[in-house]
Image (cartoon, rainbow, N blue to C red):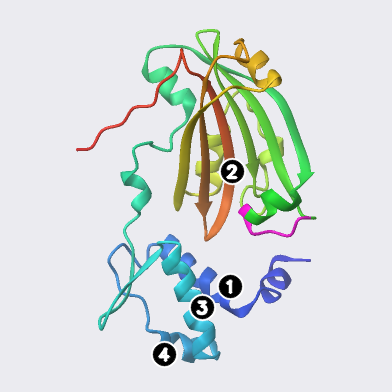
Amino acid sequence: MDDQAAQDNLPIFQRIKDYLLAEIAAGRWREGDVIPSEQALVKQFGVSRMTVNRAVRELTTEQVLTRRQGSGTYVAQQKYQATLLEIKSIADEIRARGHVHRSSLQLLERAKAGEPLAKQFALAPELALFHSLIVHYENGVPIQVEDRWVNPALAPDYMVQDFSAITPNEYLMAAAPLQGATYSIEALSPPRDIADMLAVDTRQACLVLRRQTRSGGQVASIATMWHPGHRYQFAGSFA
């Protein structure tokens, strides 16, 4: 199926969402700009008000747009930039400390999403995702195991990247420009395979960062990153 046929098979509300996202990505509407009214979009696409309202409502929920009562709908400020954790490459963090980064690819595969991941990606369970498992080292010491699932629709060349020369984060930032992210951090004891990769005991606590990134109105990747608690800390600041 070619790109145009795939586009034609999308639900109409999704086509409207994609149009609005494309206009924002192209810079035709910037943060704070008002977008066309729902009535104007109804006329442009020849659809019902309900269909347009769903597209706009979903983009508002995703914090791409913001509504102002009696004023209109505007392009929202990108909230992810204010989070405590910057979305940056671990290789850059290590180099910024004047240290040497290297990585070891443990697994790179194409696998079915399955029910739990499919729900998080909003995809059918039988569809395939890309999956990588990488150990990152700082001056030869393992400091992170990165277990990442990736949406092939947004990062089609993921499987052919040389992850000894580029990190998944660096590739994804170029292939699927960041729209937003959610994350959580908790302390957990690592399973045996993770403990072995980090060269720690299974009784030692690890700091586990789980992060979901979004691009183009879709989930781009879901990563679980394990860090040995005695070697790693998270920090941030507000201006």
Residue at horizontal 69 percent and vertical 66 percent from the top: 3
Q: Residues within 10 Å of mark 2 (few under 14, many from 20)?
A: many
- Residue 15 in view (yes/no): yes
Q: Nearer the viewer, mark 3 or mark 4?
A: 3
Q: In the visual, does 154 lie left or right of 82?
A: right
Q: Residues within 10 Å of mark 1 (few under 14, many from 20)?
A: some
User: Residue 181: x and y, percent?
Assistant: 46, 48
Q: Quadrant of residue 97?
A: top left
Q: Which residue is mark 2?
A: 222
Q: Nearer the viewer, mark 3 or mark 1?
A: 3
Q: Quote the CA–CA distance across marks 4 and 1.
A: 17 Å
What amino acid is labelled 1 in the image?
Answer: Gln
* Element on which disc 3 rests: helix
Q: Which residue range is magenta in the image?
A: 120-125
Q: Earlier in the sequence, mark 2 or mark 3?
A: 3
Tell me: residue 198, above or below residue 79.
Answer: above
User: Residue 118: x and y, percent?
Assistant: 69, 54
Q: Quadrant of residue 75?
A: bottom left
Q: Earlier in the sequence, mark 3 or mark 4?
A: 4
What amino acid is labelled 4 in the image?
Answer: Gln
What amino acid is labelled 2 in the image?
Answer: Ile
Quadrant the C terminus occupies: top left
Q: Which residue is mark 1?
A: 14
Magenta-drawn stretch, dominant element (helix, strand or loop): loop
Tell me: residue 211, above or below residue 180.
Answer: above
* Residue at the extreme top: 140
Q: Which residue is mark 4?
A: 39
Q: Earlier in the sequence, mark 1 or mark 2?
A: 1
User: Residue 221: x and y, percent?
Assistant: 59, 45
- Are the residues at dot 1 and dot 2 in contact (C-beta closer than 8 Å)? no
Q: Which residue is mark 3?
A: 54
